[in-house]
Image (cartoon, grey):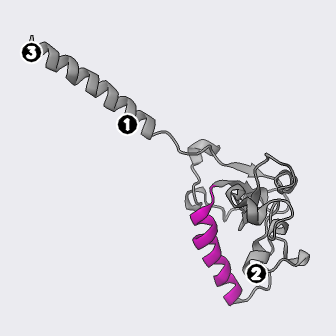
Amino acid sequence: MATTQVWVLFVLLSVSLAEEVQLNNKPATKPVRLFTEEELQRYDGSEEGQPIYMAINGVVFDVSKGKEFYGKDASYNALVGKDSTRAVAKMSLNPADLTSDTTGLTEEQLQSLDSVFEGTYKAKYPIVGYTAARLLNADGSPNKDFKPEAQPHFQTRDEF
């Protein structure tokens, strides 16, 4: 009788542990997606209840938890709803800098961009996708330099 009880307890613990392991192996976040410029503009913090998205280096971050900085009428709201790579590199809110274009940036600005990208955005905010410009050339052809396996949080099996 004692052997039967031990066996039942063992089976119950095994099933419970297997369920726990199975739950812990599920992805923690939704798969990332590809955003056009027009789609990204919808997430500019102007609509209550809508997430706030911002792109840097073609990586789209959900900055909603920083609503006091990025929300409607907040100090950094100009950066959201678009790829603001140049503005982040230059620490600028000038409308001319609110672009993904890094042409002409100094080595110091590029290092600053990398530091802020890695140390602030990747460390604090979830990645929800990539801009189409990161994956495609201006003519719509695939960007041959794009390597999915080198992208932060990019899981090819979830994307394509």
Query: Which residue is disc 3 drawn over?
Result: 2
Please name the amino acid that badge 3 sits on: Ala
Query: Which residue is disc 1 drawn over?
Result: 21
- Badge 1, how many Cα within 10 Å: few under 14, some, many 20+? few
- Look at the picture and state if 107 lies above or below 126: below
Q: In the image, residue 24 lies at what x, y percent? A: 43, 40
Q: Does the magenta stretch include residue 121?
A: yes
Q: What stretch is highlighted in magenta?
A: 108-126
Given the current orientation, which residue lies at the most extreme front position?
68
Specify which label sits upstream in the sequence, 1 or 2. 1
- Badge 3, how many Cα within 10 Å: few under 14, some, many 20+? few
Please name the amino acid that badge 2 sits on: Met
Q: Quadrant of residue 20?
A: top left
Cα–Cα span, label 3 and label 1: 28 Å
Report the number of numbered marks.
3
Q: In the image, residue 148 lies at what x, y percent? A: 60, 56
- Look at the picture and state if 64 lies above or below 25: below
Q: Nearer the viewer, residue 156 or 109?
A: 109
- Badge 2, how many Cα within 10 Å: few under 14, some, many 20+? some
Please name the amino acid that badge 1 sits on: Val
Residue contact between numbered discs 3 and 2, judged by CB atoms under 8 Å: no
Q: In the image, residue 55 lies at what x, y percent? A: 74, 63
Specify which label sits upstream in the sequence, 3 or 2. 3
Q: Residue 91 carries which label?
A: 2
